[in-house]
Image (tube, rainbow, N blue to C red):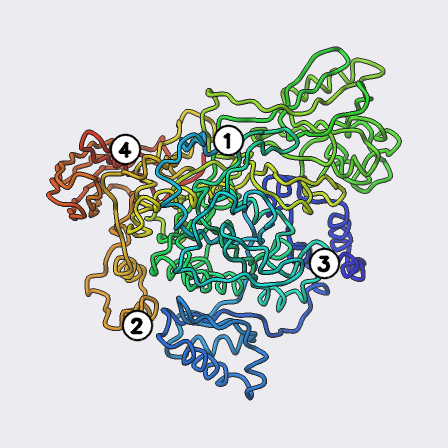
Amino acid sequence: MVSDLGSYSNDSVACQYCYLVLIQQRFFHAQQQDTSMACIGKWTLLMSIALVCGCSAILGQSEKRKVHIVYMGNSLANPEKATSLYQKVLAKVLSGKEEVARSMVYSYTASFSGFAAELSTTEAASISKMPGVVSVFPSSVKKLHTTRSWDFLGLSTTSNHGLPTGGSNIIIGVLDSGVWPESESFSDKYLPDPIPSRWKGTCVSGDSFSSSNCNRKLIGARMFPNGYEQNFGPIIGPGEYRSPRDAEGHGSHTASTAGGSSVKHASLFGLAEGTARGGTPTARIAAYKVCWFGSCTDADILAAFDEAVADGVDLISSSIGGSPQDYFSDSIAIGAFHAVQNGVFVSSSAGNSGPSVYTATNVAPWLTTVAASSIDRKFTSSIVLGNSLPYKGVALNTISLSNPWYPLVSGEAIRNASSPLANFSKYCYDGTMALDKVKDSIVVCYGGVGAPDATVLAAGGAGVILVDSFDKSVGFAFSLPCSVVGTADAKHILKYINSTSFPVADILPSITTVDDSLVPQTAIFSSRGPNVITPDILKPDITAPGVDILAAWSPVSSISGESTDNRSTSFNIISGTSMSCPHVTGAAAFVKSFHPEWSPAAIKSALMTTATPLDGDKRFNKDGPLGYGSGLISPTKATDPGLVYDADTTDFSLFLCGLNYTSEQVQLISGFSNFSCPEEVPSVIDLNYPSIAIANVQGSLNKSIIRTLTNVGFSGNSTYTVHIQAPKGVSVTVSPSCLHFDAPYQRLSFHANFQANSLPSEQVYLSGALTWTDGIHFVRSPVLIWPASFTVQ
């Protein structure tokens, strides 16, 4: 693909610069924070650079047919009639049966109605106006968002918490980059029970994968390549398998985090050694491969949702995302709506675009949207200078230097004056440094948009001291010995370099540190709210461990994301909301193993209302619920929440009315043929949601909301009173303030009113909570209020 760009590299000075940057740089933070980012599709990257530079020759001028999604709402009773209907719709804009057949990419018939087809913009616009069509939108490309963590959450390996009898009946579907079936995390050695009889899925064959790769643990494996291949051409290696086999590692990591079998003595070359396991280690796993070379198309994602529901999964984990879209122009929101409608819990990652606000993705209210937070473990790699002063950096450094001392140089001080990017040598970009000074040296580089470890390694360097001016809380793997320090330590290291004629240093391998004083913080990369589509629905919903997580890996995938890194491992440590999402999936599976009759909304409520808010005094928790939602999940508490905020398709249909969907549209989406939106349009804030958000307040505040609680406690007869933590300057009243339940599953409602003459000017948002308690259970809902002028401080 680089050679394709080369033919256009002389179009303009701007394009020459883009070409140079494309060849010379890789996105360091993107590569290291999450493997999904490390595997950014080359074509998508080319398109982005071409758009920025205005290189029209790369993009091409003529319109051509592209894959579009035609969404037609709830599923029809007869799949054959549905397919025939889709063909008739296409025939109205295309010429003849052969063209219709060539255009069709997928037919969606199991849990919802619609199809994916190659259409021009004009053809798509014509179909969008046809009766029975809810929406038509291009099949865009989404990205993957990327031991100790389950112990940290209170699920120790010494207690089975009522499993495996319940857990072995739970089936977790994972939409991701596939699975490495030989991993011990997918062994069925300790699963004597047969596969649940309701399972209708299968294992499809392909490159280096056959049905024999599945077992009583990994009970299903499918692939969905059509959308990708229509966009980018045939899937041909190296670097990918046209099969459910995982070439990247991301899919194996997320699947094993959610429901992997227990594996003793798992580690990344000695780091994080312990027992690796999923939240429900006896659960069954079904892998749905929708991502190829790191790219996941809407058409493939929707096909996977459709099949997973038909196969009989209980939960779906999707660590994939793009920019927020209208709910029914978003493949994940559409697939999740119909999955939840069929009783399937769906969790999805909030994204890795933090710490800026308004960055959370996957924000539909029927989704459980997951932020990422740290745990009580970190990995430190010490740097020792020739003056014997040590500095403690952070890294996943598993490589030992062969000699005790190496020359220490600064990338800024050894610039290559002939390079057009010489002024950027402090970032150690390829070609910016004098190669003879780099060879066999440890180089001090500043974090930028490149991959300094790769450029230093290519130049024969021995190691890198990487300076991160913003954050060093996340451990990254590198292709050579490397340690990350802050700017304060960097000043001392540079001062030492300038103080002696022959500065030297050593970088030591990382060690694992478990420290109870490491209070959980929202990960710096974790996307924050508010919800850009529906601000009155608080997103993200909840947080879970997503920093430095050890889990299964593909042994053919690079540990550091660098093609020159040939180390192979069965377990890897990576970070991202991709890692936190399957923690919530595993916790939800754990809850469902105790309460198989609970709805997805009830399970979500149980997880949210029993979560622990993070310490707001910590640096990266300053965004409060906008960063971590209800708080850190507590799986054991969630099995007995006392009360839940339940919701079903009727509730979500009324919610859609509040978003100005017409009755006809809601009928198509919900499948309720007689549904009509009320004359008095419902307020979206009254969706029976476990959190409360009041957005865009202008001046004074006077807002009432209604919620309904369902008694799921073990005692049918119970009385709950409300405890109010009012946001600063806001008067809160709840009526009634006491709820008495006489029977299990009884539902009782309450109203809450929020009043303020004006919002305090010194805060960008106001937070509080409503907690219902019977003295045993504490059912907590975060409250967040912010003005229309909400900004980032």
**Disc 4 versus disc 2: nearer the observer:** 2
Instruction: Identify which amino acid the numbered label 4 is placed on.
Output: Pro
In the image, which is nearer the foreground, mark 1 or mark 2? Answer: 1
Chain-order first, disc 2 or disc 3: 3
- Residue assigned mark 2: 664
Q: Residue at x 16, y 37 (%)?
A: 733
Does dot 3 land on a helix, a strand or a loop?
Answer: loop
- Which mark, by number, is residue 148? 1
Instruction: Count every numbered label the image shows and give the total.
Output: 4
Of the 4 image quadrants, the one containing the C terminus is top left
- The quadrant where residue 394 appears: top right
Spatial CA span between label 4 and label 2: 40 Å
Secondary element at tag 2 = helix
Residue 516 located left or right of residue 749: right
Which residue is farthest right?
A: 436
In depth, the one of 209 and 678 nearer the eye is 209
Q: Residue at x 52, y 78 (%)?
A: 123
Q: In the rendered structure, which amino acid carries the disc numbered 3? A: Gly
Residue 702 in which image quadrant: top left
Residue 355 makes an appearance in the image: no
Residue 746: give x, y in percent of width and height.
15, 48
The residue at the far front in this view is 192
